[in-house]
Image: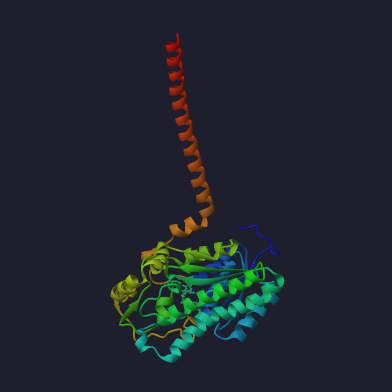
Amino acid sequence: MNSTTESDADVVVVTGASAGVGRATARAFAEQGAKVGLLARGEAGLEGARQDVEDAGGRALVVPTDVADSDQVEAAADAVEDAFGPIDIWVNNAMTSVFSPAAEMESDEYRRVTEVTYLGCVHGTQVALDRMRPRNEGTIIQVGSALAYRGIPLQSAYCGSKHAIQGFTESVRTELIHEDSDVQLSMVQMPALNTPQFEWVRNRLPDKPQPVPPIYQPEVAADAIVWASRHDRDELWVGRSTAKAILGNRIIPRQLDNLLARSGWGSQMIDEPADSDRTDNLWDPVDDETDYGAHGAFDERARDRSYLLWASMYLPHLLAVAVALVVLLGAAIFEWWHADHSVTDSESTDAGRDRVR
Ligand SMILES: NC(=O)c1ccc[n+]([C@@H]2O[C@H](COP(=O)([O-])OP(=O)(O)OC[C@H]3O[C@@H](n4cnc5c(N)ncnc54)[C@H](OP(=O)(O)O)[C@@H]3O)[C@@H](O)[C@H]2O)c1
């Protein structure tokens, strides 16, 4: 049972709240008593999210929204503030993608992925900033990916959008710093996650797609998002694979190109032929009748914690412990050295006295 009172409960907006990471994030905020605006398109998924939030102790407002349409995002923000009051936290999470070699992509597919994944995030950031900047408070979280820094094969539209979010976020953050604003803008870079994405994004590959292992549960992502919203960090990396991809790309980009050219196909598909009849969520939601929930089909292979995330969350504590250990060790060495030399000094003083006698 949480002790948050109705008046001090955070007002949170989550885009893409009907499934996957957004769904888990809405629930995680609700567990802290938040009032959550749930933005996405699919009716069954949104209704399931509303139920999750209420079961977890929060309040929910379902606002069917296509984030590619800036007017709809603006209207959604108004609806949330009318119902719950000023928005404290805005989470830009909605996404779509197309699994396909770039050579087979249609130009309208590039446009749509960019409009949902990149511009959806821009629209959310704009409406959040319009409300937060005059109040000089509030937090915006961009749900990012290791692929915001490192492009991989077969997801060119998505990787381009995630890179664009990263650049956009840095740019806006510098402007907020320039005007000495207290509005916080953070990006959480995620590893592969077990979400419904792989069952419903458009797929042109011969086999069924999978997140590139290691795979983490969406609750790991949700915990990172909630934590980031309460701590002033520009970026948070989740999962060792994220750190490896981002740092590796800084140090050995060419070698990673070659590695991905060899391994990037097999690592993104499972050994089961793709279902050529299945519908996808590029233009319209597929969760109108079926609630897909937060988890995808990879529960058995998914990890439910990230040690790297834990280490980054407790970095100041770990540094304090490390400094304390170094100080204690230094004091112990000094003590030992001093005692040793005091003995030697007193022995040599005694020997000197003996010589004098
Ligand atoms: N899964 C991974 O491996 C992974 C890895 C790294 C980063 N991420 C990031 O995590 C975030 C969530 O991804 P996920 O895997 O949870 O995806 P997901 O399972 O496919 O869920 C996507 C969410 O976005 C919504 N959405 C799609 N198109 C929309 C539109 N036009 N307007 C509004 N909402 C829309 C979907 O609901 P409707 O279709 O009902 O609208 C759904 O709620 C994304 O930012 C993604 O880049 C995921």
Q: Residue furthest front?
A: 356
Residue beneath the point at 49% across and 84% down: 114
Q: Nearer the viewer, residue 133 or 297?
A: 133
Give residue 58's position: percent from left, percent from top.
Answer: 61, 66
Seen at 54% across and 81% down, the residue is 120
Image quadrant where one finds the C terminus: top left
Name the side, left or right, on which 157 lies relative to 27. left
In this picture, residue 66 sits left or right of residue 341: right
Point out the residue furthest to the top here.
Answer: 357
Q: Is residue 81 left or right of residue 97?
A: right
| Residue 213 against residue 336 in the figure, above or below | below
Question: In the depicted view, which residue is nearer to us: 138 or 220?
Answer: 138
Q: How many marks?
A: 0
For the residue pair 282 and 240, the one nearer the viewer reads as 240
Image spot of residue 215 (x, y percent): 39, 66
The quarter holding residue 76 reads bottom right
Q: Quadrant of residue 40?
A: bottom right
At 43% from the left and 76% from the top, the residue drawn is 197
Q: Quadrant of the N terminus?
A: bottom right
